[in-house]
Image (cartoon, helix red, strand yellow):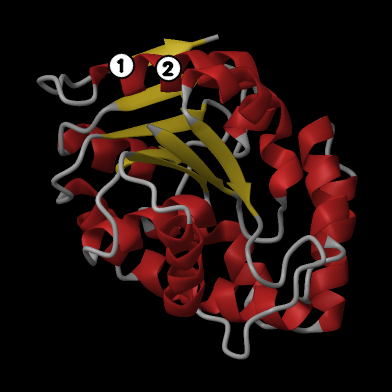
Amino acid sequence: MDAYLIHALGDGPESFERFAGLIRHDFERVRVLTLPGHAGRPPLAEMSLDTVAEDVYSEIAADRAVSVLLVGNSLGGVLATLLVARDRIRAAIVNIEGNLTPADAFLSRHLADGRPDTFARVVAELRSSPRATVRRYAERLNVIDRGAAASLARDLVAVSQANVIGEMYVNLSVPRLYIAGSTSLSDPTRSFLESRGERLEVVAGAGHATMEDAPEVVADLVRTFAGTIGKSPTTKRSRRG
């Protein structure tokens, strides 16, 4: 099985660096993708959830991967859900804090207006966070193509408010696991997942970039999940720390 790791809006492959190293020997291939407009990669001519999802698909298709696990954080979880729901790829999904309900679009709402002063304020607030991973995210966000960020943020707000991705996710016919940090999982998203009987793992003390805050814990969860693929699914709700 090949694992493809998809980062969040405004982030970059660095957020998966430690986690990717921990699971590298558990899969035939582990690739951390860099989304257009991020980490120095030029944006696409048109930046939208649809065009970026298609870009992710082209990266995977070029590898001729047969058995695939998509691991997406935030925006990455949304892109993974779109690709599978639209039958672009057949893959199991580990969704790390991907947008499912309106409560999950907090940062996107601030970035969506595209104004330089708003962007600067968001970066400054993130830089003042007591959490080191958030401060590192602020530095990666500060070098993103801002037009690309605003376009993707607007799309994320729209699909979150309409609960489009949430309904897509729970109706997928592939193995899937939702992982969240205990400090950032919203009550509406927890209630939504639990009411639909979804696999949910909550990592104690971790935040939105759960795999960066607690890479060893998330790596163990992903290994365990990958080992269940092809077996009868079970609903799991637990708190790890």
Query: Measured from the top left, where is residue 85 in percent x and y?
Result: 23, 60
Q: Residue at x 16, y 25 (%)?
A: 230
The quadrant of the rendering that contains the N terminus is top left
Label 1, label 2: how many angstroms apart (C-alpha)?
6 Å
Q: Nearer the viewer, residue 58 or 227?
A: 58
Q: Nearer the viewer, residue 162 or 172?
A: 172
Outermost residue toward the bottom in this view:
45
- Which residue is the site of mark 2? 223
Q: Is residue 173 above or below residue 132?
A: below
Mark 2, secondary structure of its residue: helix
Q: Is residue 115 above or below residue 78?
A: below
Query: Measured from the top left, where is residue 49 in percent x and y?
Result: 46, 73
Q: Is residue 225 visible?
A: yes
Question: How many marks overall?
Answer: 2
Mark 1, secondary structure of its residue: helix
Query: Measured from the top left, where is residue 107 in percent x and y?
Result: 63, 60
Residue 31 occupies quadrant: top right
Mark 1 touching mark 2, by CB under 8 A? yes
Estimate how packed mark 1 is, as few (under 14), some (14 to 19) or many (20 or more) residues with alpha carbons within 10 Å.
Answer: few
- The mark found on residue 227 in the picture is 1
Residue 229 occupies quadrant: top left
